[in-house]
């Protein structure tokens, strides 16, 4: 276990990327909305870290892709995008009060370089293959699939440092107009998810404190979800989508952001942090751990635990259409962004992380 005090400083109003990658292969030109040129995407013609075969095959244009579907039918729509410079800069974190816990702990687990993905979700649909009907990126626990349970997770290897066997996962972001070379490509196409999955340029898994109180340790095998994968077709009350661009962390939107040159597309997946003190799961996978009030205070009978955020960034080539994987009914709406987590940290690591947070230190 390595604890580096004051190693990582994460300002409230900006993104700090922890694991970065430089992906510079040229991208073939593909479909794009004309309006996307207004907020031109970052890094010129870089390919955004597309997943590819080990032999370095480039992505192909839609004309050479026999898995393509018409984007107008699939979504997203033009009004699902917004120039980040037109978004109001009004994001604020709750003020840290006396007695609050102001530290952070970063779990370093990579960017899914080993291409661990599937369309399962063992939290919401245990034992069901393709239960999610969209592809997930996974970091951390290397065994996670639809058949996972506490015992299988405990036995597995991990991509994380310090023996963190937790599973962290989220739907992939795809670049339209390029071939999906994953083993799940045909099933993805049947579910309306087309294009090349993008490897994030950076992944930050950040645990922070509570602005009003110390946090207690998460129980092992605690399950948490955030967001609503069916927010577009449903009432959207559980939606938690937060999109932005690097350098614009105080501007958050439920739409896909169009970023200026030099800025990456970014997703923030913000998890609940008030635990009922007893259960590691519940029938709806939400009632046992809920979000705090606006000022950070937990409701009565709920206890503050470390606040987990996924910060994901992507290099999107200039003027290229990108979209989130989702259920067929959701038309790739950005409001459906969501994430899942199961805590499989060793008890000692969770204890040290919690101590770090409560002592106001920044550790990894």
Image: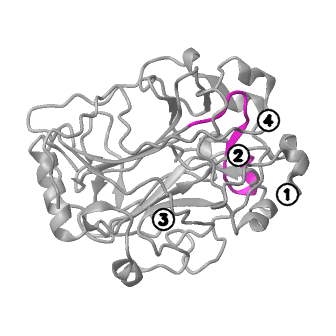
Residue drawn where x is 75% and y is 46% of the image:
331
Residue numbers of the magenta segment: 315-331
Q: How many marks?
A: 4
Residue 237 in the image: x percent, y percent? 54, 44
Q: Which residue is mark 2?
A: 332
Mark 4: secondary structure: loop
Foreground disc of the pair 4, 3: 4
Residue 21 in the image: x percent, y percent? 47, 43
Residue drawn where x is 31% and y is 44% of the image:
292
The answer to which of marks 4 and 3 sits earlier in the sequence is 4
Foreground disc of the pair 4, 1: 4
Residue 107 in the image: x percent, y percent? 30, 54
**Callout 1–callout 2 Cβ contact below 8 Å:** no
The answer to which of marks 4 and 1 sits earlier in the sequence is 4
Measure how far apart labels 1 and 3 are at the Cα level: 35 Å
Q: Nearer the viewer, residue 313 or 285?
A: 313
Quarter of the picture containing the N terminus is bottom left
Mark 3: secondary structure: loop
The answer to which of marks 1 and 3 sits earlier in the sequence is 1
Overall secondary structure of the magenta section: loop
Measure how far apart labels 4 and 3 are at the Cα level: 43 Å
């Amino acid at each position: 276990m390595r604890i580096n005090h004051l190693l990582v400083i994460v300002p409230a109003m900006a993104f700090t990327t922890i694991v970065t990658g430089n992906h510079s292969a040229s991208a073939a030109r593909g479909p794009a909305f004309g309006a996307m040129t207004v907020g031109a995407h970052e890094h010129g013609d870089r390919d955004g870290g597309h997943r590819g075969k080990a032999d370095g095959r480039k992505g192909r244009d839609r004309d050479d892709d026999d898995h393509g579907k018409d984007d107008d039918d699939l979504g997203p729509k033009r009004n699902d995008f917004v120039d980040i410079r037109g978004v109001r800069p009004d994001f604020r974190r709750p003020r840290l009060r006396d007695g609050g816990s102001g530290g952070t702990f970063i779990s370093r687990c990579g960017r899914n370089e080993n291409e661990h993905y599937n369309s399962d979700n063992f939290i919401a649909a245990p034992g069901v293959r393709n239960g999610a009907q969209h592809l997930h990126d996974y970091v951390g626990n290397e065994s996670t699939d639809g058949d996972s349970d506490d015992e299988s997770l405990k036995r597995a290897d991990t991509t994380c440092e310090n023996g963190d066997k937790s599973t962290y996962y989220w739907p992939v972001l795809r670049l339209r107009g390029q071939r999906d070379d994953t083993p799940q490509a045909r099933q993805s196409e049947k579910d309306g998810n087309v294009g090349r999955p993008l490897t994030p340029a950076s992944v930050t898994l950040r645990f922070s404190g509570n602005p009003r109180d110390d946090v207690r340790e998460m129980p092992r095998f605690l399950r948490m979800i955030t967001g609503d994968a069916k927010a577009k077709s449903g009432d959207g009350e559980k939606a938690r989508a937060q999109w932005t661009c690097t350098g614009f962390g105080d501007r958050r939107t439920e739409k896909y952001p169009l970023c200026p040159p030099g800025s990456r597309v970014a997703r923030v997946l913000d998890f609940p942090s008030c635990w009922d003190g007893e259960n590691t799961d519940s029938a709806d996978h939400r009632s046992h751990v809920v979000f705090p009030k606006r000022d950070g205070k937990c409701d009565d009978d709920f206890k503050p635990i470390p606040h987990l955020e996924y910060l994901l960034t992507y290099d999107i080539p200039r003027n290229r259409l990108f979209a989130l994987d989702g259920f067929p009914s959701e038309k790739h709406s950005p409001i459906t962004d969501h994430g899942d987590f199961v805590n499989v940290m060793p008890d000692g690591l969770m204890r040290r992380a919690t101590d770090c947070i409560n002592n106001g230190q920044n550790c990894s």
